[in-house]
Image (cartoon, helix red, strand yellow):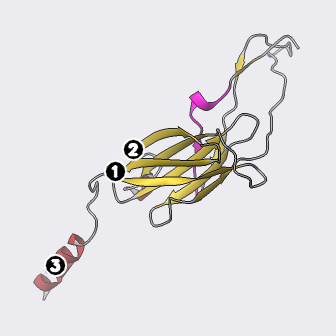
Amino acid sequence: MIQRWIFALVVGLGALPAVGAAPHTIIVSGKVLHPHARPIGGAGVSVVTNDITDPFDSWGGPHTLQRVTAAADGSFRLEVPVRSEFWSINVLAFKDGYGPGQQNVWRGSSSTGLAVPLSPPSFVAGRLVDAARRPVIGARVSAKWVIPAEGEGGYQIPAEVQSPAVTDAE
């Protein structure tokens, strides 16, 4: 009886996808939208694939990054590699004069026909001072934008996408 149970367990496990199954590609496509839901062209689109084979280390697994510029009608299309059967994809859109847009795709959901709305423009303002409250001149200042994620964690925009500012005398 125990031998049959072990055999059934081994046969049952054989039906599961192998960890680190052969890499394959997924088509990611859609349109970048103005904050008022109209298509908008010329936006940069970044697609980050995440290997989530280990569900307890979903943000620490291997990542790949690909970029494309949306066409005049806002459309974009990329073929992105995934390394296993367990993956998630973050689609990020950026365009000068607008806040960023973002869409998540998980295994089992559609990665085509996505709508990625840009957010309304916003800004950060402030005054950088030293301990004596004197203005700091010539310091490089940049903001880190974090997209809230389901559960714990988030996604930080890569440094090359951020626009650092330099402080002046005011």
Residue type at tag 1? Arg
Q: Considering the numbered disc 2 on the image, is that residue within a helix, a strand or a loop?
A: loop
Vertical side of 124 occupied by 40: above or below: below
Closer-to-camera residue (64/146): 64
Instruction: Check whether the beta carbons of the residues at disc 2 and disc 1 lie within 8 A of each other.
Output: yes
Q: Considering the numbered disc 3 on the image, is that residue within a helix, a strand or a loop?
A: helix
Residue 1 place in picture, x, y as percent: 12, 89
Is 161 part of what is drawn in magenta? yes
Find the magenta span and give its range.
150-163
**Among numbered discs 3 and 1, the one appearing first in the sequence:** 3
Residue type at tag 2? Pro
Identify the residue at image location x=18%, y=81%: 8
Residue 59 place in picture, x, y as percent: 48, 48
Residue tagged by mark 3? 6
Identify the residue at image location x=84%, y=27%: 126
CA distance separating discs 3 and 1: 30 Å
Q: Residue furthest right?
A: 170
Residue 5 place in picture, x, y as percent: 17, 83
Residue 167: quadrant of the picture: top right
